[in-house]
Image (cartoon, rainbow, N blue to C red):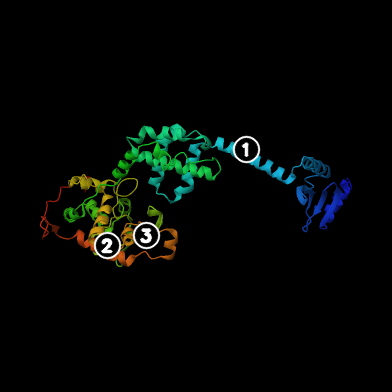
Amino acid sequence: MGKLNSKAVESLAKAGLPGRTNDGDGLYLQIAKGGSASWLFRYKFEHRSREMGLGPYPTVSLGQARMLAAEQRKVLASAADPLATRDAAREAKREAERQAVARRTTFEDLARDYQQAHGGSWSEKWRKGWLRKLELYAFPIIGSLSADIIQTEHILDVLRPIWATKTRTADEVRGQIEQILDAAKARRLRVGDNPARWRGHLDNLLSKAEKKKARQRQHFSAMHWKELPSLMEKLAQHPSREAKAARLLILTGARSHMVQFAEWAEFDLITGLWALPAERMKMRKSFTIPLPCQAVEILQNLSRADSAYLFPGQGKSGVMHANAIRNLLHKLGHTDITRHGFRSTFRDWANERTHYPREVCELALAHDERDQTEAAYSRSNFLDKRRALMAEWADFCSSPLLMDNGTTAAPMAQEPEKLTDNEQ
């Protein structure tokens, strides 16, 4: 032991010749091929030779290296493996640090982190609504708690006050909490089962009947497809831009915000295509809608104001009010249907009156139900088939009214409603 001295170590390090120099009792100065020097402790454990790094030179001096080697010899004398002992100590330290971070990181912090990580593909309205539900119902109860201490009783404290009265919202909040706690577990900020899991857990503690009713209530009120030609006739006779917007909404199967913020630059009236960029779509994927000739005619007859939008408005958004179409429907006596419900009307009609494949009908509504693997092999967007489907839909919407005896009759002309100053 003690074969080296400080000057000898310094000279060896400056020379930079690859190799190892023994200081005794398992301590070596190692010079790598690149010339860097470090300390190495060699030992045998259970008849196997092992090597353990003690740090770089000159950060670790000769004296310090000898002390470190002496500590490892003590570990070895206790019948323990120095490498395994050091690794266990490091893991224990990391775990203690993780637990400290977990205790400092609240559920509200985790929720906002989750929104930041996943919200890039959400619409702005969805982002705000997602966080707003947590702010109203979850944060007051578990917002300040760390993820590792949240248990089933905490989740029940959040859900029980609203489970019977706002079951749909409560189930959405439950799902959000489950996602956030799953993410926390992936970050090793908690262990064990997820206390917000429904199947096999909360379904035994909360009423399933209430949840079933909530699912039934969440469907948007929709007009029966047989009644749609009558409404389309009313809208065709109504001179307002809201009526034109409603007809375009119905003929294309679009969501209301897609029509509300529609821009002229998105339309090609020659090819009959409406190309929506990814940022305008709910799933953040660009989408093209084939326009039936009836929709093209509406657009051709639509006056172009000094605006990029089809339906400009006076508010901050620059487009017509979000409830403009709904208000028109109410004035026409249809208070029991919603704008989004027309998509269900289209889907019911397609089911009962056409033989188009399900994936074509769903994609017409921008619902791509193919999984990632299937979509990778089937890159078609079924544009030609969707064009034919939407043409049949538009023809039906413009068809004569169906009588109870199965015959048809032309709809009666109705006096257009007088417009208010705001509508004009």
Residue type at tag 2:
Met
Residue occupied by mark 1:
96
Secondary structure beneath dot 2 equals helix
The residue carrying mark 2 is: 390
Q: CA distance from mark 3 to mark 2?
A: 15 Å
Bin the neighbour count of mark 2 within 10 Å (Cα to Cα): few under 14, some 14-19, many 20 and up.
Answer: many
Asked if the residue at tag 2 contacts the one at tag 1, i.e. Cβ–Cβ closer than 8 Å, the answer is no
Measuring from the top left, give residue 319's x and y in whole percent: 31, 50
* Rendering quarter of residue 335: top left
Is residue 242 in view? Answer: yes
Q: Alpha-carbon distance for marks 1 and 2? A: 61 Å
x 26%, y 56%: residue: 346
Marks 3 and 1: in contact by CB < 8 Å? no
Disc 3 element:
strand
Residues 401 and 235: in front is: 401
Q: Amino acid at mark 3?
A: Phe
Residue at numbered disc 3 = 287
The kind of secondary structure element at disc 1 is helix
